[in-house]
Amino acid sequence: MKRRAALVMAVAMLVGCQREQRDLRLDPPVAAALDQVAPTANGIGGAPPDVYVALGGPYESNAYNLGEGKRLYTWFNCKGCHADGGGASGPALMDGWWRYGADPVSLFVSLRDGRPNGMPAYRDKLTTEQIWQLVGYVQTIGMASATTAAPSRNDEMQSRPAENRAPAAADLPTPPSR
Amino acid sequence: MRLRHLIVSVLLPLAAGGCAGSQSALDPQGPNAASLAWLIGAFTIVCGIVWLLVMIVVGVALLRRRGAAEPADTPLAEDPGRERRKGAVVLAAVLATVVIVTGLTVISYLATHSLTAASGEPLVVRLRGYQWWWEVTYTSPSPDRFVTSANEIRVPVGRPVRLELSAADVIHSFWVPSLAGKQDLIPGRDNQLTFTAERPGIYRAQCAEFCGVQHARMALVVVALPPDEFAAWLDGQLRDAATPANEEEAAGREVASGKACAACHTIRGTPAAGTLGPDLTHVASRQTIAAGTLPTTRGSLAAWIADPQGVKPGNKMPMVPLSADELRAVSAYMASLK
Amino acid sequence: MTGIPHDLRDTEVDRDTVERRLAETWRTRRGFWGAIATVDHKIIGRRYIVTAFVFLLLGGVLGLLMRWQLATPEGRALGPDLYNQVFTMHGANMMFLFAVPVMEAMAVYLVPLMVGTRNIAFPRLNAFSYWIYLAGGLLLWVAFALDMGPDIGWFGYVPLSGPQYAPGKRADIWAQMITFTEIAALAVAVEIVVTVFKQRAPGMTLDRIPLFVWAMLVTSFIVMLAMPAIMVGSTSLILDRLVGTHFFNPAEGGDVLLWQHLFWFFGHPEVYIIFLPATGMISSMLPAFVRRPVFGYLALVLSMVTIGILSFGLWVHHMFTTGLPRLGESFFTASSMAIAVPAGVQIFCWIATLWDGRPVFRTPFLFILAFFFTFVLGGMTGVMVASVPLDTQVHDTYFVVAHFHYVLIGGAVFPLLGAVYYWYPKIVGRMMSERLGRWVAGLIFVGFNLAFFPMHILGLQGMPRRVYTYQADLPWGPLNMFVSLSSLMLAAGFLLFFIDAVRSARSGPPAGDNPWDSPSLEWATTSPPPPYNFARIPVVTGPSPLWENRDELPVASGLRLDRREIVITSVADAVPEARESSPRDSLWPFWAALTTSVLLIGSIFSPWAVVWGSIPVAIALIGWFWPKGTPEDEA
């Protein structure tokens, strides 16, 4: 009984720490290592850097990093092209299947190196950490079911439900097979 | 008026000594702050006297010799006449309280009134609070003479300055105690604050409303200049950034416009045109960098650029990986942007 | 139970039998579940008090951490993120988990004894209140231990606490912790009002109610009127954050300042929720130490009621720098100054009591004197911050930190510590050490003033609040070091107090029924009181019953012994109206609190928790109120 309670506490602590930790300063060697993704030949999918795995994927489940990603999404005017609901020069990112992949490595490569048909490279505008923060955030606005770490609405005019109110993945049409 | 001088001279030793960049309500350098310092002094003296009187009465009540007429073991024994007299004294004390409180309220109203009586055409400066820095825009009747700067407000001596306060993200509060009381910068609301600097000098100001992780390092300085110096300075600010004087600075300009710097910062006259961070066109002419965190020197600029999260953890400037040469160049260039 | 004849009255048997039967009827069962199920106001009150003091200890440690960080410029003890959590936790913990609950805890224990009844009204609600309070406290502290402690200040201003600028669950934990403590506080407030209005001993007319009870009555009304504002506020905040509503989003028609109005409409009365019980404690303790009844009973009562009313007209003085219309600000200056008048009335009446009294310098009285020195000073700086222009210079600086610690520690904690020394023998049955008590009072009084007085000067020298550090070229270093060192002295005083309290529980000299020769009813029973408080309900003939009836109190009889029964009296004159049953022990309040806690904590993560969580809550409530055909169900 006592041991089980301790176990539950330990798990809760780990989850809690992961989710709420705020690492305000990323060590430069770690930042450099985070840049070492190994995409597949066509640039879609691939292996994340070892350090990313070792850190436990902090950019997808950590509330602070997701919040920073959301800030960068606004600051760097991602909305300008990927407007909610589409209509601008980029896809709307509201659905679940994206041409150049929706997994973290693909997204990282898309952001860092750019993609054909208009997606610019952000290599020289964002740091590696910022790109990872954006990768984490972008995953919460599309197909993703709302996680408890997802950010909520901004203090601005609303054009879509907040990320933590995002529709569950099951509600979306299945992506066409490639 | 003599009383006013007396109070100020009593309070002055408590002040910061009037050194450059002082930030003290007891070191007034303008009419607003002076009348507030006077008010603080007046309240302190009145309240101090009242407090002292109450303490004396408590002390006397405790230590006075008891008459033998009242035996201790009959606590319910009562002398109606004595009770009535005590009632009268309490009533008098209450009335005195009412009078004092009313008097203080009236002084407070009068002070408010004098604070709002401005004279002369004010210089209008827009101050916008960001997490955790200040954007300063000097307005002008002609739009091409607007100047944007950051973390430092220069004002002409003797002319009232009207700050138009707004906030970009959360609530901040502008407080330059040597010149005026504080006023909040609130998202969705417009506030303003008018003050006049009477003497040339440098007055430190600081954010006074908790605004997040780096609330402690959100300061700025108000620099009061003689009017002609101010006009000359403002003309200088209208110019584009200084052109590099040597190869190192030129290399620095390349770094600043090619690397992530340009995504957030504007350096007028170069490709760098980001609007997310402070305008750096004349960054080296300002007293401090990172909102009052470090004095502006080439060394501190390098330290800041090399590791902003080490200097001011949690601020929005990322650590951009630069080689040693790049860092040297870009800090030399920044230091040249007078 | 078959041995007890039905409808056995205390008139029919001798005193020994009465006490035996009553003890059987009112006792709390032994064992773990017995302790969980108890509804005895004394056991719950004791728990409440101990828990609140544990939170005081924890909050004090946080205070020391802050002083460690601020002792030197550019301190490196805590980082900015941790410092922000620590100062938020310190404020929220002290206000919501210590100051308000401890005052209500004292009332839960003392009010039924002081009005001469056998249990508090709605005793099961009382048990529920404690469990909810405990759950809220655990929520906050466990979150802090998990690095999820709120970092938005105890006031949680939007937009900083809102959805955009406070990622994660830190702000939600803060907001929901408030819900817990408010539910607990509202429950106690209702109990106290009903206890005071309907359960007073026969003859305890309105002008014979002990002043602490009056204070708690006024406080309870303030609680009931003020707490809903903060619950509306914190719930709106959670909705904004979790569901995406726009109460505080200016872009969608919300208003940032709305939060501040809601918060301070609660937040300012909150100060009086803490302060009024303390004044009541002083009024109730003073007679024992000056050997006189308090002077100006009516004036004291009226001034408490006046403070209670005025406390709702002051909230804007926390918002003088937000740029509100000047006329409105002027009104709030006047009302904030006006509250000095009723506060002054109380001070003057106490001094008049001292004047003719014969002071007995025991530890509780020393704390009362410390109160005079400190609180009056805090009141003076209160007058200063009430002035709009003056406030623009000192608002959000260390001047205000000094001011409110003077009124809260000087005005509430000093009387509270005195009250602990005073009522400890009643609660525990043993005296605390007089020798240590003098040290405690001395260390705390001197340490407090040395630690907090310099903060006035720091504030005027321009040091803002809530900064995790300051630069070395600012002139604040030496004073901050002095303050930090003095805080160690204050901490030593509190440490000694805790040591004394723990040690005396085992080895203090036995107290006897009335060690201070006090005049009010709680001293008429044994120390500690039996589960039924009074073998026979006392009848009150004056404002100082134990001084007026030195030999024996007149008592009322006719109550049943085979079920828990109390006397219901009329509101104004306390004329007996009815015999009423009082609920027996029950586990349901505990289950209800547990399910409510699950609902509230779940609602931080998903709005659906409110829907699904309400089912177990409903089950627990149905179980709670299900008629069982027991004696208590009889009219």
Image (cartoon, coloured by chain):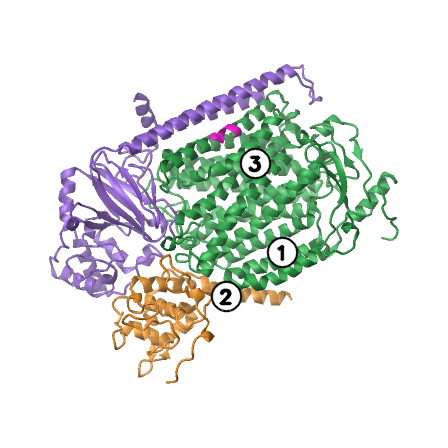
Chain colours: A orange, B purple, C green
| Amino acid on which the number 1 mark rests in the picture | Ala
| Amino acid on which the number 2 mark rests in the picture | Leu
Classify mark 2: residues with Cα within 10 Å, few (<14), some (14-19) or many (20+).
few
Residue in front for this viewpoint, C357 or C41 = C41
For residue B22, which quarter of the picture? top left
Mark 2 vs 3: CB contact within 8 A: no
Q: Which mark is residue C593?
A: 1
Chain letter, disc 3 residue: C
In this view, the residue farthest toward the bottom is A178
Chain letter, disc 2 residue: A
Q: Which residues are magenta?
A: C338-342
Q: Is residue C144 left or right of residue A143?
A: right
Q: Is residue A31 above or below residue C625?
A: below
Q: Is residue C110 left or right of residue A39?
A: right
- What separation in Å lies between label 1 and label 2 (alpha carbons)? 27 Å
For residue C357, which quarter of the picture? top right
Q: Which residue is mark 2?
A: A14
Residue in front for this viewpoint, B275 or B119 = B119
Classify mark 3: residues with Cα within 10 Å, few (<14), some (14-19) or many (20+).
many
Q: Which mark is residue C276?
A: 3
| Amino acid on which the number 3 mark rests in the picture | Leu
- Residue B48 in sight in this render: no
